[in-house]
Image: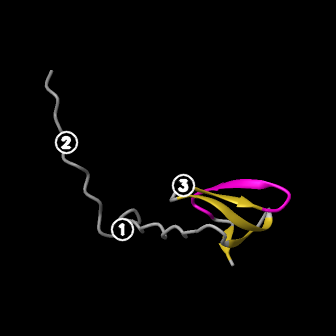
Amino acid sequence: MTSHRSAPRRRLPGSPFNVPEVAPPPLESFVLQDMVSHDTYGLGSVIGVEEGVAVLVDFGAHTRRITAPYPKLFKL
């Protein structure tokens, strides 16, 4: 039995799937002692940075590690 390799499927010009990929927005960068606001935890201060991975934030009563991307974390 022979196997036939088919050519890659060609998308039609009017296809809704023929949309170029959009690059994700760049990650916001944080440095030590940045004041931040989080939608759930409130106001805090950055006490640790793992570049492109996570930030460690002191919110007063507790400390949280917020992983990237940071959708609810805003620099003040």
Q: Residue at x 17, y 29 (%)?
A: 3
Q: Position of residue 26 (x, y in %)?
A: 48, 69
The label on residue 10 is: none
Q: Residue at x 66, y 72 (%)?
A: 34
Residue named by callout 3: 53
Contact flag, marks 1 and 2 (Cβ < 8 Å): no
The label on residue 6 is: 2
Q: Mark 2 falls on what kind of element?
A: loop
Residue 66: name its quadrant.
bottom right
> Few, some or many C-alpha atoms within 10 Å of disc 1 (few <14, some 14-19, many ≥20)?
few
Residue named by callout 1: 20
Q: Amino acid at mark 3?
A: Val
Q: Earlier in the sequence, mark 1 or mark 2?
A: 2
Q: Earlier in the sequence, mark 3 or mark 2?
A: 2
The image quadrant where one finds the N terminus is: top left
Q: Position of residue 12 (x, y in %)?
A: 29, 63
Q: Residue at x 42, y 68 (%)?
A: 22
Contact flag, marks 1 and 3 (Cβ < 8 Å): no
Q: Residue furthest top?
A: 1
> Few, some or many C-alpha atoms within 10 Å of disc 2 (few <14, some 14-19, many ≥20)?
few
Q: Position of residue 24 (x, y in %)?
A: 47, 66
Between 24 and 73, the residue placed more toward the observer is 73
Q: Amino acid at mark 1?
A: Pro
Between 37 and 57, the residue placed more toward the observer is 57
Span shown in magenta: 59-70
User: Is residue 9 shown in magenta?
Assistant: no
Residue 8 falls left or right of residue 59: left
Q: Nearer the viewer, mark 3 or mark 2?
A: 3
Q: Residue furthest right?
A: 61
Disc 1 and disc 3: Cα gap in Å? 27 Å
Q: Mark 1 falls on what kind of element?
A: loop
Q: Is residue 37 above or below residue 41?
A: below
